[in-house]
Image: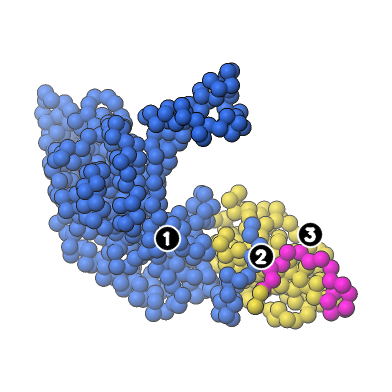
Chain colours: A blue, B yellow
Amino acid sequence: MVKLPIYFDNHATTPLDPRVLDAMLPYLKDDFGNAASRNHVFGWKAEAAVELARKQVAALIGGSDKEIVFTSGATESNNLAIKGALEFYREKGDHIITLKTEHKAVLDTCKRLERQRQERIDELKLMRLGDLAGRTVSADELATLEIKHDLEHDATLARWVSQVKTGARVTYLEPKKDGLVDLEQLRAAITDHTVLVSIMLANNEIGVVQPVEAIGALCREKGVLFHTDAVQGAGKIPFDVEKSKCDLVSLSAHKMYGPKGVGALWVRRKPRVRIAPLIDGGGHERGMRSGTLNVSGIVGFGKACELAKAELAPEAARLLGLRQRLHDGLKAKLDMLVVNGSLEHRLPGNLNISFAYVEGEALMMAIKDVAVSSGSACTSASLEPSYVLRALGVDEDMAHSSIRFGLGRFNTVEEVDYVIDLMVRAVSKLREMSPLYEMAKEGIDLKSVQWTAH
Amino acid sequence: MAYSEKVVEHYENPRNVGTLDKNDPNVGTGLVGAPACGDVMRLQLKINDSGVIEDAKFKTFGCGSAIASSSLVTEWVKGKTVDEAGTITNQQVAKELALPPVKIHCSVLAEDAIKAAIADFKAKRAARTGQAAAPSAPSPQLHK
């Protein structure tokens, strides 16, 4: 008999490995020192522990310990990589390229930078209109006066705008239907102003693994920086900073059986990549991230990386086996299933499936002893279905019907079998209750029905 | 998000799931919502010659609250006259199920489904008795 509840949501977070906890405990009790205390044994012990962890984290991705900047987590790492690199290399340009399926920590950072640039341009427009109108112009008048004075063709304004040093211009690439980046599109998007390409290693919703080695080679050839959010992929699939030629890599401890609240940004030293800090203070982490180090968290992060590296190949094979068992078990008893994203280029522990004609939240309610996620709008605050699935061109109704299974280190064959059985019963029951399933079975083309949108 | 006990109860033991013959002149069918929005409700009412709802069946594609809302209204309308059923409001449904603000649209859909089913029934009856069909509520039409 399996133990309930079952946790199949390992992309959201992972349980702390007991071996990680054991490594952390001394630093939550007797060895409480500040790693920046240079003149006593408490500080030395903490520093030594942090430096060991730095080596363990760097080793996981084939980097050097001198290239690790510890942060509060991958959201901070992504912010630091993008805003930090843009600020440092502003003289070179202000253009960023990313993918529509990136994590919000990347997309919303880019959106803020775009907005900052637009706000600066709007200020300049008001100044220019003030000159032309011979009086102070208010923001409300911008839209009308802009047309009246034909600002679009104003050479003075164009010159001012070309000097803007605030925010960024951003290109959001459309992924292919299987979720992978189109390398030709990426090549075409790179301009003389491009500073940074930010494309993740593996997606958090659909588990699709991007061709980072090809992206890295292209970025190196074009002389632009390559940042990758490796949160979901690092420690799960082989990943090496030299092979992928990346310049900045975001990592998080709690996605690899470490503690929450700690992450890292790997910053290449050869050739040297520079970033401006977001947080000023005591000059920790070689000035790139001030703030007293989270020693116990960092120790746990290091241990988690060591374990992930040591167990990577057999664990990846085991998870792939579980995933295939889950997929085969569902396919054997349920029709009209669609896997979202490439099945071939995918994290071993990820399965994202749309169960046609059944709504995701209702499904999650039916399997309430099993923790999974859904791309249904009903599970989010925004009432919009998953933007990742929408970017792949998945129809809205199929996005509403999606379930993400995230298998991890502590899941078992027994759990997978239990979930298959439960899912089959839940989907069958809900389909019996679904007017869409009945209509589809009758051969009615649901796309030809005039629905009353609400 | 936690669901109210009543939502869970209806969701786990839905009342009156099923299909009535849509070609039966005494059956009114209301199909509201849209797959793209994540909920579609189909409510069918069997109405006798004295205008009393004898039977009600539903099928719903949607979240737990949408399924509970449809289940609840099938219970409520049975035994009521068409006119009485037409006065059921979404607020009554939302209150009974203690729906949170983000789920209010599920109760709106349930009210719309009742109105659409009644409109369909009235349109059918008007056509049968040879009268000009009254302007019907927006009930989705199938284009075969």
Question: Which image quarter holds the N terminus of chain A?
Answer: bottom left
Chain of residue at mark 2: B
Question: Which image quarter holds the C terminus of chain A?
Answer: bottom right
Chain of residue at mark 3: B
Percent coordinates x, y for residue A192 in the rendering: 30, 41
Front label number (3 vs 1): 1
Cβ–Cβ below 8 Å for labels 3 and 1?
A: no
What label does residue B32 carry, if any? 2
Front label number (2 vs 3): 2
Mark 1 highlights which residue? A392
Task: Determine the residue positioned at 58% across, 24% down.
Answer: A138
Chain of residue at mark 1: A
Which residue type does callout 2 highlight? Val
Percent coordinates x, y for residue A288 in the rendering: 24, 32
Label 3 in the same subunit as label 1: no
Front label number (1 vs 2): 1
The front one of A319 and A148 is A148
User: Which residues are drawn in magenta?
Assistant: B126-142
Secondary structure state at the residue bearing disc 1: loop
Percent coordinates x, y for residue A241 in the rendering: 18, 49
**Res. A235 in view:** no
